[in-house]
Image (cartoon, grey):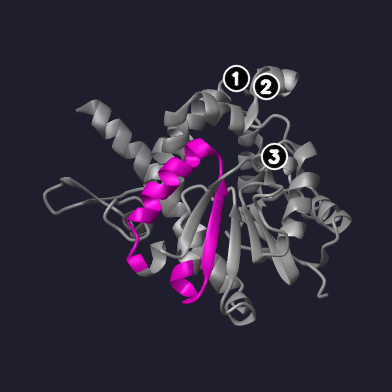
Amino acid sequence: GERLKTLLSACVALKLIRRRIDENGTDLFHLPKASSKQLVRTSRQYWGDYLSMQVDGQFYNRLADIDNTIKHGTEASHGYESWFDSDPDAAKNYTKAQHNGSLATAYALHKRLPELASDFPSMRMLDVGGGSGAFSIVTSRVIQDATAVVLDLPNVIETTKSIISEEEESVRRRVSTLALSATDPGSWEGVVQDESFDVVLLSYVSGSIPSEALAGLYSNAFRALKPGGKAIIHDFFINNDGRGPPNAALWVLAHISVNPAGMGLIPKRVINILSEQGFIAPRVHELIPGMTKVIVAKKKNA
């Protein structure tokens, strides 16, 4: 009917599908290569759950009130930790939705930083705010002798354990979990041992917590690292000049709806906080073009 034709026309305009007319004048529609790879559930590169379950299912409704959140901050939203504590189903859906996309990003991270495998062939990694465990899973797949600990909120970790359990035994036995808050520096004491990790990964964490918690988080990461270890900060970053990239800037804006007390991440601001905690030699890399960046900083050798 007309409603379906209208929908198909919109999808063609957005280049999500393609249209051609056969010799009988019949409209024929098919998926372009990018849609086939990324939006078909049976594809290895599928990440449609992120769009349907997280962006559409959890963020669009919050954006309807973005003006109120910008005006009143935490009076309108109290952040991820409060949200997930009060709504276990939201935590579960958010974590599951993120998984496939994060697997692909994790492989891209190792491709961007191949030195991780050579510097730390028996890497022990702390995956802070690790969500589904995707980065830990990929690290254990890529580096044969690597082990990883996924640290996240209790309601998230329940889903993490389920996802890890589906991995081959050679991977799942090397990925463990730890239910802790990233925003409470004191909660790590006596639980996360000092100088016990080669790498501390913080992917999509720095922009998801209150800005006042960043210094304590990076301090905890510094203490957890062995001398010579590396902190990896991966997130949506606006360029230092504040002029984009557009997709990253729009995501940072959307994030206000959940994390109104957060920082609009800019590389030089994050590097300054890392340096204040003792990190040296920061390097900035682009990871997802036009979207995310990675900052790698080092703990000085003893």
Find the residue positioned furthest to the right: 276
Amino acid identity at mark 1? Asp
Quadrant housing the C terminus:
bottom right
The image quadrant that residue 207 belongs to is top right
Q: Secondary structure at mark 3?
A: loop
Q: Which mark is residue 65?
A: 1
Pair 3/1: label in front? 3
Label 2 crowding class (10 Å Cα cut-off): few <14, some 14-19, many 20+?
A: many
Label 1 crowding class (10 Å Cα cut-off): few <14, some 14-19, many 20+?
A: few
Q: Secondary structure at mark 2?
A: helix
Q: Which residue is mark 3?
A: 183
**Does the rendering let one see residue 163?**
yes
Question: Which span is picked out in magenta?
Answer: 140-169
Distance from the alpha carbon under mark 2 to that under mark 3: 21 Å
From the viewer's side, name the closer residue of 197 and 292.
Answer: 197
Distance from the alpha carbon under mark 3 to that under mark 1: 25 Å
Amino acid identity at mark 3? Thr
Name the spot of residue 147 as percent of width and height, x first: 52, 67
Amino acid identity at mark 2? Thr
Name the spot of residue 219 as percent of width and height, x first: 79, 52
Find the residue positioned furthest to the bottom: 118
